[in-house]
Image: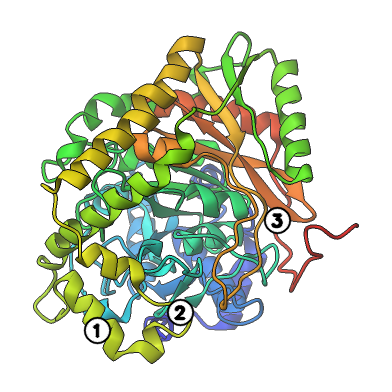
Amino acid sequence: MLFFSAFSGVPTPSAAAATVAAFDVVGKSVKELADAQSRGRVTSLQLVDAYLERIGRLDRTGPALHSVLAINPKARAQARALDRERSAGRVRGPLHGIPILIKDNIETADPLPTTAGSLALANNYAGRDAPLVARLRAAGAVILGKANLSEWANIRSSVSISGWSAVGGQTRNPYALDRSACGSSSGSAAAVAASLAAAAVGTETDGSITCPASLNGVVGIKPTVGLVSRTNVVPISHSQDTPGPITHTVADAALLLGIMAGTDPLDQATRDADAHKADLADLAVRKDLIGVRVGVLKISGAPTDVKALYDSAVKRLASAGATLVDIEPPAGADNLGDMELTVMLTELKADLDAYLATTPAAQTTRTLADVIAFDRQHAAAEMPFFGQDLFERAQATGGLLDPQYLKALAASRLEAGRDGLDKIFSAQQLQVLIVPTMGPAFLIDPINGDAFNWSGPGNLPAIAGYPHLTVPMGLVKGLPVGLSVMGPAWSDGAVLALGGLIERLLGRLPPPTYAHTLLPLDSPR
């Protein structure tokens, strides 16, 4: 496994264990860690060692979460340098010395390949930071390593297993090891839930931040498409792709997103990002929910316990002074799936071919067709559980000028955006819309693939490109369930501010216990 080859430079177990005894990182937010450093209670190097000790104890042995795909061999050196800066009186900001993980479809300049979980990209040592990573690094973050993911961000097969990659193995949910961490940012969310890093960065095309965050009991935000650069990120769809933070708290998500956001001349979608970056600065602007108009999306088919949690959350919002408005799902929401897939597969071929053309010369798979051929040649390692039917369909698409693609793109954006979410927000004068994010985690099933027990309408903000935050709503038989907070385009700051207030009302979840299994969700307690 790549993890072991990159696990050099880790302190001895006894030294790292002593660090943990001195300072416990479990459940600590970025802001708590920043405060502890400022008070001299812990150094960045001690934080790195504490997280590395937990990774060694929980991720590869013990529960064996397989959430961390590779450790950055320069992480401890980065931490030492940042500690020296602090000692000299230079503190870059609240992210100074904070160890974070980066999903392994995002390039970093560290001596690690960016694999997207595939052996086909084993030689993709890009030697460059994605702009979002450069921003985090400049703000003082320590790049602790790479997080595991659903291979190729879950776009290779229609019957894939969330959280599995040929490079990193099967990510497991820390609340129940036989249940899914969801995908594709499975490792990012599971690692934060297990306190293997202070925070992580994921990516989403449709559900790949919000689903893992919900199922692992943490906070995740898919920002407005174009707020964060996608340059040097292994792509699926330029219409819907966006990186975003996964954290313990909404305040941490706002902090990371504010640093990651910004205009990038190489990503045309970010041309307005700088103009909206200031909106993320201060969650304290919103003091309470009094008079805030919150759309409460009606749900059907959700598990009884999920509906009970949702009803309880709605009552708490009402008690806190929010004006609640019942909302019916958009009429055309059920028709979006086929159009969205047409868009994603067409853009996948164009965007992935363009990305692979920029990879180092040693990287020999330089087109989607090359990747398909590689998978066939290495089927035992790459396709032990599921194939690559979506890759093959993408390869057969007709390009970005194909009338079928252009029609699907226009129609899906219209249905999800102007005639969907925009109409709801405008007609009812809503600040945000809420709905359960997902049902609780389903069993990992390598035979039949993912079996979602219930999903909220997260495809609406994904297709429209609008912000979608999920915060922990509670537990169903020991498994986390999230509450989604959605807003119109470029309302990321308002979504985070209101999400922070909702988070305070609902409270944080207890930490995971790494249970081997839980009762089936339909079993009586």
Q: Which percent across, then down, holds residue 409? A: 25, 40
Question: For the residue marked with disc 1, what is the amino acid?
Answer: Phe
Q: What is the quadrant of the C terminus in the image?
A: bottom right
Dividing the picture into quadrants, the one containing residue 448 is bottom right
Q: How crowded is mark 2: few (under 14 residues within 10 Å), some or many (20 or more)?
A: some
Q: Can residue 40 be seen in this view?
A: no
The span from disc 3 to disc 2 (Cα, nearest Å) is: 25 Å
Q: What is the quadrant of the N terminus in the image?
A: bottom left
Q: Which residue is labeled 3 in the image?
A: 511
The span from disc 2 to disc 1 (Cα, nearest Å) is: 33 Å
Q: What element carries label 2?
A: loop
Question: For the residue marked with disc 3, what is the amino acid?
Answer: Pro
Between marks 3 and 1 in the image, the one whose residue lies nearer the viewer: 1
Point 18% across, 63% down: residue:
128
Q: Which residue is labeled 1 in the image?
A: 374
Q: Which percent across, then down, holds residue 469? A: 50, 37
Point 15% across, 56% down: residue:
398
Q: Which residue is labeled 2 in the image?
A: 10
Position of 194 with respect to 486 (left or right) is right
Q: Which percent across, then down, holds residue 129? A: 22, 59
